[in-house]
Image: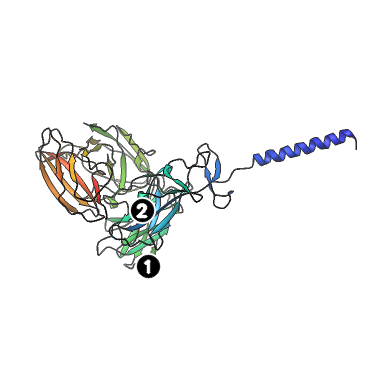
Amino acid sequence: MPVHRLLGLALISAFLLACGEDAKEEAPPCDPVANTGCDAGLVCEATAAGGSLCAAPVVLTGSVFPISVDAPVENARVVALDVNGAPVSTVTTTDAEGLWELPIPHTRNDDGTPVGRRLTLRVDAPGFQTFPSGIRQALPLDTAAAVERGGRFVVDNALTHVRLVPLPEGAGRGTIVGRVDLPDDRPGVLVVAEKDGAGFSGIADRDGNYAIFNLSAGTYSVAGYTRGVSFERTTAEVADDPGASTTADLARGGEATASLSGKVSIVNPGRGKATSIILVVESLFDEINLRGESPPGLRAPRAGLEPDVTGAFTIDGIPAGSYVVLAAFENDFLVRDPDTTIGGTTILRQTLAPGQNLTLAESFKITGALDFLPPLGLEPLGVTAAPTISWEDDSSEDAYELVVYDALGEEVWRHTEPGHSGSDPAVPYGGPLQPGMYYQAKIRSLKSGTPISQTEDLAGIFHVLRE
């Protein structure tokens, strides 16, 4: 064969080999949406740099038990939520020993380690109060604390082991289950079943599945709430039977969403700098604790965790419905001004029609909170004996009103403290101490019988440690 033909074949072979290497190098990465392209035991995840890679899964593990006994809770539903209340996982259920595992889709660093993410847990079970609810908070856990173990990144700490509060005798035993027609971007959905003005809730996970427990017998109106989407209401007939459930699926509707605008006026803020606004579904609002459940995304600011509202705000994408508008609800060193003798201080209820763009006529009056002093503070405190309830003295009060509630919203202790001048009040707690129970102290400063400031809505919580 002529030399020039040999050289030509060699060049062609080299070219084809190079193309093959290039094709191999340029092969598409694994698909993080479909979770394909990885070996068994690995998952495909997006990277912070915008690509994808195969990595060991991130898994939350924990347990669910009653608050005061060591009998595990089986078939409790556990889901992980982001800071805006949207599910970041499917739902898992506890086994016969009360144990659960929950894989979490997670952005990765280039070396496959998880990028830290703050999440909270929601737990629902028949016969138990939903966690979180009432005065109980779900403290955020950080996936940056995951430990590599057995080919997985595992988060297993005190925050993943949840104790549930049993409901009192006479609570409903019925259940509604169903599936929500989620949009393509799969936001979280708060599903609410209402009867006689009372609401009960469940969370639709990333697959759209939900369950609402502990319902009395009767006919319920069922609706879904999340930012930017409307759902058609449906009805469900519930039997008071713990072994039966009623199915109510939710389809997306065609109604336009609404928007709500307003402003806050911050006076005497103390350590506070900025606040937040949330919308609570009215039927889920707790009149005693002045709190409730907010649908995913119905918050200003919408993105991020830190409050940033100092004046005007807007919440858009609101499904039609009735809401309670709460300002300065989160722990930000600010509270709604409790002085009802001035405008902008009452609890605001607002019904929004489809497509309505409403601007509130009156601003929210916000003031600095009464700050708890150690041992109480912004995070729940574990105690084995009665704590001392202490707080910074207000500058112009003539009395204080101190009330303590338990996790079921029942008032368990009340105390009136005379005004202080130049010293911080300190009062030994004189109420019940049930093992495992959560309690919250609330304090208002008074001037001639009128409230002028108060402690924060989510502060002053303590729980009795089990021996």
Neighbour tally class for label 1: few under 14, some 14-19, many 20 plus, Cα within 10 Å: few
Residue closest to the eye, 242 or 113: 113
- Residue 206 position in % (x across, y down): 45, 51
The answer to whether marks 2 and 1 mark residues whose Cβ atoms lie closer than 8 Å is no
Q: Which mark is residue 226?
A: none
Above or below residue 204? Residue 301 is above
- Residue 144 position in % (x across, y down): 43, 42
Q: Check disc 2 and give the amino acid type.
A: His
Helix, strand or loop status at disc 2: strand
Above or below residue 172? Residue 52 is above
Quadrant in which the C terminus appears: bottom left
Marks 2 and 1 sit apart, C-alpha to C-alpha, by 28 Å
Q: Which residue is mark 1?
A: 244
- Residue 305 position in % (x across, y down): 36, 39
- Residue 247 position in % (x across, y down): 40, 62
Q: Which residue is mark 2?
A: 161
Quadrant in which the N terminus appears: top right
Q: Check disc 1 and give the amino acid type.
A: Ala
Please give left or right for residue 255 compared with residue 41 in the image: left
Q: Which mark's residue is nearer the viewer, 2 or 1?
A: 2
Residue under the image location 41 percent in, 56 percent down: 100
Residue closest to the eye, 80 or 352: 80
Q: Earlier in the sequence, mark 2 or mark 1?
A: 2
